[in-house]
Structures are given as C-alpha cells and as structure tokens.
Amino acid sequence: MTRRAWRQRWQGEGGGRELLVLALPLIISSSFWTIQVTVDRILLSRHSSEAIGAAMPAVLLLWTPLTLFQNISNYATTFVAQYLGAGRKERVGPSVWQALYFSVVAGLSFLALRPLAPVLVAWGGHAPAVQALELDYFDGLSFAALPILITAAVNSFFAGRGESWTVLLIDATGVTCNGVLAYAWIFGHFGFPAWGIAGAGWATAVGSSVSASLGLILFLRPRYRAEFATATGWRFDPELFRRLLRFGVPNGLQWMLDALAFTVFIFLVGRLGEAELAATNIAFSINLVAILPMLGMGQGIAVLVGQRLGQNRPEIAERTTWAGFQMTWLYMTFVALLYVLAPGMFLWLFQSESDPTLWAQVAILVPVLLRFVAGYSLFDSVNLIFSFALRGAGDTRFVTAVSLVLSWPMMVLPAWAAWHYGWGLYWAWGFASAYVVALAFVFWLRFRTGKWKTMRVIETVSVPAAAPTPPAELEGDLAEAAPVRGVGPKLTDRLDGPSPSLIDPQDAEVL
C-alpha cells in the first residue's frame, strides 16, 4: 500500500484518526478505573497477603450481578449514537432517562444481595480469615451499586454523542476521590481510623457517588435541555423502555455470564490453596492494567458503528472497526512481550512482607501465569474489538449466546476438574486461555458475515410514498383546478438530518 493510501486510511472517514480522537478520552477513563483497582490491590497487599487474596473474590461477587445492570444502563449509548446519526436529537434525552429509571430500581434492589453474601462467600471454601475479609470488603462495595449504575446511564449520553472528554472528567473525579479516601481509610491517615479492607470498599462507594452527582449536574445543563430534551424528556416511555431492555438485557447478560464464569473460576482456584489464589488474583490484576484501557477503544468503536448505521453507512462502520483492531493488536503485542520478558517489573508492585513464606510461593507462580496472560491477551483484543462492533449494531443476542455456550464447558468445568482430580493450577489456566481464544474466533467470524450491517436498535420511521407525477399535458389543468400552496410537508422538513433506518428492529434479533 502506498504512503498516500495509508494516509487516506488514517485521516479519512472511518479511519484511525477519527476513532482515536473519540476513543482516547475513553481509554484514559478506563485507565483511571484500572488505576483505581490496581492501587486498591497494591495498598491491600501492603496491608496483608490475606487482604489481597480476599479482594478479587469480593469484587467479582459484586461485579457478577452488577455488570448485568450496568451494561443494560450503559447500552443507552447505542441508542444515543443511532438517534444522533439519524438526525433525531429529540429522542436522545428520553432514551437516557429510561436508562436512569432502570438504574435507580436496579441499584436499590441490589442491596437485597447483602444478606446472601455470607452464604456465597462460604461456598468459595476459602480460609475463615479470608472469608471475613471478603465480607468486610463486599459490605462497602454493595453501596456503590446505585451510583455506579447512574453514572453508566449518564455517561451513555456523552459517549453516544462523541463527547468523550466529559466522560473522562466524570470518571476521573470519582476515581481521584476514591484513591485519596482508600489511602486514608485503609491505613488510618489524616485522622481517620485504620479500617483495612473495609475502608477500601467504603472509599469505592463514596467515589462512585461523586461521579454520579457530577454526571447528573452536567446532563441537565441548559444547552443540553434545548437540543436533546434532557429535561423535557424525563417522562417514562414504556415502548422505549422495553426497547432498551430488549437489546440491553442480552448485552448485560453477556457481561454477567462472563463475569460469573470468571468468579466461579477464581473460587475454584482458591480451593487449590492460598498461594494459588493470591497468584491468580495478582495475575488478573496485572492483566487489568493492560486490557481494561482497551475497553475505551471498544466503546469508541461501538459509538461510531452506531452513528454510521444511524446514517445508513455500514461501510464506514466496517472501516472503523478494522482500524481499531489494528491499533489494539499492536498495543497488546507490546504488552504481551513485557509480560514474558519482564514479569518482575509487575510483580514487585504487589510484594508483601507480612507472610514471607506465602509470598515466596506466590512469586514463583505469578511469572508462569503471566505467560498464559501474554498468550490469551492477544486474542482477548480480537474478542473485545469485534464484540463491541456487534453491540454497536444491536447484535447483542448472538454475543450473549456465544458466552453462554462456551464459558462453562471450556473454562468453569475444566477448572473444577483441575481441582477435583488434582491436575493443578496450570491446567485450570490453560482451559481459561482456550476459552478466550475461542471467543475471539467466533466474534471475528460473526463480524465477517456482515449480518450486523442490517441491524438497528432505534424504531422504524415510516415515510409516506411520493404521489405519482401527473402527465405533462395535465399539469396545467390540475394547477388551474386546484391551485394549492403544498399538499404536505416536504421530507426534509419532517426529518432532521440524515435519513433514519427503515429496517425493522425485529431483523436485528437474528442469531
């Protein structure tokens, strides 16, 4: 390919530059969340080896049901993107309000899980001291559910319109607040008592509440009220709400099933021993540093795919997806090399002196696990990019079906077998890696078929057929017999912007 062609691919519509401009703030925003998770792990590892071992199971216990609700709320991003692409700005605010209503109900009902936490934690079979820490952490985290869901709904308004720097501002404010409070409340600084792992959980609840409050204030700014009906569109819209659930629930289920599979995997690995559990938690935490920022790239792809499909320009959406894949693959290749060639650079961040014997075992296991991470993370980037492109079109049922069919037979059940039959930690990780590889191939093949190009999540807009043109010899007679100023509004007066989708959303639900 010539230099001119490369430049055109980078700078043209659907090229890498357009995607990177939108995705960069989302990448940074996802990185802030990664930094929050990693800093919590580092602080807890300085507190005790048991605390770092308890952190990941507690987070996954929260995240498994929460990810269902969060990704339903945040799926309003696709509605916003497609409405904007179709030039129907008056439908943007109402779609976000439906997500907010869902977020409030789901966030409040989430607190019902708190009484079940001791039973769920006990099922993991971890040491009693670790179980007690898991419960302390989960207790604080459970109050973060409502503000996290509200933030997801509000961020859909800004992300779906391409205002990704505002998303970064909202998330960075909450993460900064969380980091400062976690430092103070874990170790007892600035006059606060030392609450240990419980302090980390409550810091997350407060930080997420700050993000939600800021997001709502910005969403209701006067300039958005006039253009996008963010204030007047507050009414509950049953049809639009059902449509959000229709596409959003499969989207949320996919994330929940994936989180559930990894949660059960973590608990099963914990039965292999404390060293195996701590090493697995550290390896996953290190992986988060690399892969979660790429969620920002995936979100950018989903937004641009939604906007282009709203404009009925699927060829530009396809070009954007491939540009995102190329950038993500290069990035993950670099990170995978670091995992293999310099594992100690990551390991020292989590070093704990509270139990030298346990840490010595962990330090042997982590570099080996990072080789697994290096291998599957390359395929995880494929999985991430193409699954987000499918979500941006509305192909959420297929994405969910794939996760349901593959996760348990390829990862969870083999992990149970590795514990039950004494195969060991590396066999369990080998099957988990195979699961990620399989997902990547399936989503890539689905994208290549092109069915997503005909899918939409927004409702059909009927356009009346044009009246037949009378014969030339009759035009004068008709004009004299019926001199009118116009028989109705022109199409350009009825539809603001590019032509909306004329494809019934039922067509978007094919597997």
Image (cartoon, rainbow, N blue to C red):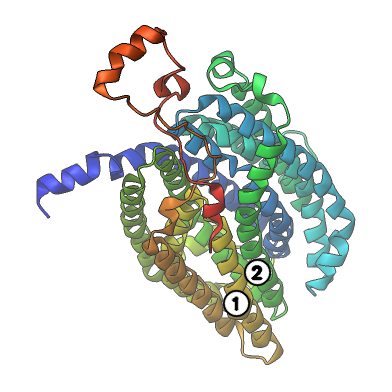
Instruction: Tell whether label 1 touches label 2 (CB within 8 Å).
Output: yes
Is residue 23 left or right of 121 when viewed as pictured? left
What x and y, as percent, mark residue 14? 31, 43
Identified by mark 2, the residue type is: Ala
Q: Earlier in the sequence, mark 2 or mark 1?
A: 2
Would you place residue 259 above or below residue 182 in this image?
below
Tell me the residue that label 1 is attached to: 411
**Label 1: element kind:** helix
- Of residues 325 and 404, the one drawn nearer to the viewer in this rendering: 404
Residue drawn at the location 47% of the way across and 55% of the way down: 390
What x and y, as percent, mark residue 158? 52, 31
Return the mark for residue 177.
none
Is residue 330 left or right of 171 when viewed as pictured? left
**Label 2: element kind:** helix
Q: CA distance from mark 2 to mark 1?
A: 7 Å
Crowding at dot 2, Cα within 10 Å, few <14 / some 14-19 / many 20+, comes out as: many
